Amino acid sequence: GDAYRAWLRYAPLLPDQAKEYAPWCGKIVVASSGTAPLLAPAVEELAAGLGSMLGREPRRGQAADGEGCLVVGTLDSAELQGVADDAEAKALGDEGYVLRTVDEPGRRFIAIAGRTDRGALYGAFHFLRLLQTGRPIADLRIAEKPSGKIRMIDHWDNMDGSIERGYAGESVFFREGRFLEDPEDRKRLRDYARLMAAVGLNAVAINNVNVHEIETKLITPELLPSVAKAADVFREYGIRLYLSINFASPIEIGGLSTADPLDPEVKRWWAERAADAYRHVPDFGGFLVKADSEFRPGPFTYGRDHADGANMLAEALEPYGGIAIWRCFVYDCLQDWRDRTTDRARAAYDHFRPLDGKFRDNVILQIKNGPMDFQVREPVSPLIGGMRHTNQLLELQITQEYTGQQRHLCYLVPQWKEILDFDTHALGEGSTAAKAATGELFGRPLGGFAAVANIGSDLNWTGHLLAQANYYGYGRLTWSPELTSEQITDEWARISFGHDPVVIGTIKRMLLESWSIYESYTSPLGIGWMVNPGHHYGPNVDGYEYSKWGTYHFADSKGIGVDRTVATGTGFAGQYHDVPAARYELPESCPDELLLFFHHVPYRHRLKSGKTVIQHIYDSHFEGTEKAEELVKAWRSLEGKIDEERYESVLDRLQLQAAHAAEWRDVINTYFYRKTGIPDEHDRKIY
Ligand code: BDP
């Protein structure tokens, strides 16, 4: 159904629109001068998409004659000569494309062309998107290339079929310790690869970063044949497969007595594993590593550092062009909450900043967007833009671990936009986090984006249907971080729901407001956490307050917040470059929404909004809950305008969200009312 096809739904177009497009879409000509395997899926997708939207499958033809047609291929082919000049072609790089309407006597076609077949594949998806969103095609002059080289999705899937932090069913890769390899499983995997490629994604890690017993064996000849079959599916769409590895593998499956990264035996062992991997998967992407974090093994055990660990793996992968992606989510998860001199927020920077310049060129550090852990609101990690001589991937979380677990609507594109646009000031004004991540800022050879997937075996992929927009938006942003939330949302809404202005307008508003709504009824002013321990769903103000995880709010009867200033606090604010560091250091200049992340203040402290902190807490929780109810009303207004299946499934979740928002409101407001004894200015009922 529509939910399964997601952004490749290709709904039939209205007759007027179809009439405008049809003259160009009757025939597809494939044009290449050499082998170009990615043209096959491009043509197949165009044929299927146009067939479904226009009601008539295009013919496959040989040459472009006077009749309008599509010419799909590489710019060096005879058919596409002159479509782009040398400079234009060069600027496209290996993944870019042009879409050009050529309308001359005897020569009428739309070119969908890259320097490479990969470019043409992305161009084909762009062309289809133009039709899906109702754009004109009679005069196309589009040239695009991706911003990030690596545009990756990380699956936290376990081989038993479960998904760590998964909220949309089970794994689409594994079940009961085995790969899913039946024809219908393959078909689903292929459809998934299509969805990825359609938004420009080119890398996938298929297993959880917490690598347990069986998954450790993914890099052995026992399981590599199955890995290879999955890689075949992704390769068809230009996607490279990566595996998360267990740093202690040499001991756990290699029979060695150590996993010391400087030990020659250990090095040899990993070199052999890399060789095995490439024997089975010639275009294997590389290893993704979580080490010395949350009880995972790592180089610390042997008195080595992260550079030693990452470089050892990178060296093993280097002969094959592989990459070692090393995660920076490293902190002491056994802290003492009474010790205010330690601060989890500092950890990633403290660990990795001193190692800048020590990593090989095929190492990439994968850095979570914030210094804590994917909270609804965090400042951008100071490591992003904090290292000049090290490749970076900015890691985001599409799966809604802390943002409502796909029961609540929380559209994250606006959050990601703020992150990408954040000015690190690393090289003065304009040094955005996006540029730091892609490598543009410091001229790094590699860089890009990674995000934890929100998909699973649910028929609509994401559990909450509207959570598809998060996956879609992530992909689009990795390609073009400069796209606005509004543009991406408009695209997704039209592709998914057609062009009725009332439907589109309503859905866009719902999506665009949802992050702010979610934030307003959950933990206030950047403090984060306040969730139930373990599963992280639902309110629990002190759930993590007296535990070891380093996630505190320090609320007492007088005040709340973490003093992370240089002057009197943990010093975290000093990890930023001059301008943001100064802004965060003082409560007067710190943005309201991050106040409690950086400062411990009395409840009557006045925000820039003019409200006191306590009144802000009360107000935002009442308002947020009302707005969650308005989401239900807004959706109800679309009854009959959307197919019943999708309508009902979203309605269910919105109702659940509204009820749960009320629970959040009551728990948070009651807690602070009791703690402070300060009444609500508007005298509303607080339990
Ligand atoms: C946290 C999750 C945990 C992950 C960890 C990570 O709660 O399940 O293993 O991040 O990113 O958000 O490694």
Image (cartoon, rainbow, N blue to C red):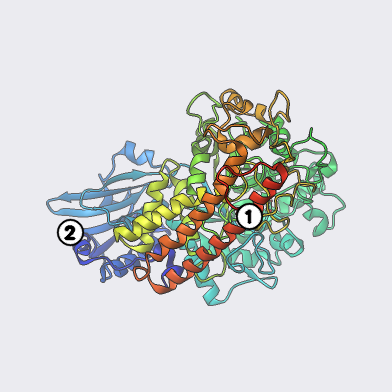
Q: Within the image, what quadrant is residue 29 found in? A: bottom left
In the rendered image, the vertical position of residue 52 relative to residue 612, given as above or below: below
Is 554 left or right of 682, judged from the image as shown? right
Q: Can residue 30 be seen in this view?
A: no
Task: Classify mark 2: helix, strand or loop.
Answer: loop
Q: Position of residue 310 (x, y in %)?
A: 70, 42
The residue depicted at 50 percent of the width and 72 percent of the height is 187
Q: Crowdedness of circle 2 by 10 Å Cα count: few (<14), some, many (20+)? A: few
Q: Mark 2 points at which residue?
A: 65
Q: Where is residue 172 in the image (x, y as percent from the top left)?
A: 58, 68
Q: Where is residue 546 in the image (x, y as percent from the top left)?
A: 80, 47
Is 342 left or right of 498, judged from the image as shown? right
Task: Out of 376 and 306, give the one closest to the viewer.
Answer: 376
Q: Within the image, what quadrant is residue 252 found in? A: bottom right
**Amino acid bearing label 1:** Asp
Task: Out of 621 and 362, give the one closest to the viewer.
Answer: 621
The residue depicted at 80 percent of the width and 39 percent of the height is 304
How far is disc 1 from disc 2 in space, using C-alphas? 69 Å
Task: Classify mark 1: helix, strand or loop.
Answer: helix
The N terminus lies in quadrant: bottom left
**Amino acid bearing label 2:** Asp
The C terminus lies in quadrant: bottom right
Q: Residue extending furthest front? A: 683
Q: Residue extending furthest left? A: 105
Q: Can residue 559 be seen in this view?
A: yes
Is 163 left or right of 431, judged from the image as shown? right
Q: Position of residue 572 (x, y in %)?
A: 69, 31
Task: Out of 178 and 114, give the one closest to the viewer.
Answer: 178
Q: Mark 1 points at which residue?
A: 666
The mark that comes first in sequence, 1 or 2, is: 2
In the rendered image, the vertical position of residue 54 relative to residue 520, given as above or below: below
Question: Which mark is nearer the camera, 1 or 2?
Answer: 1
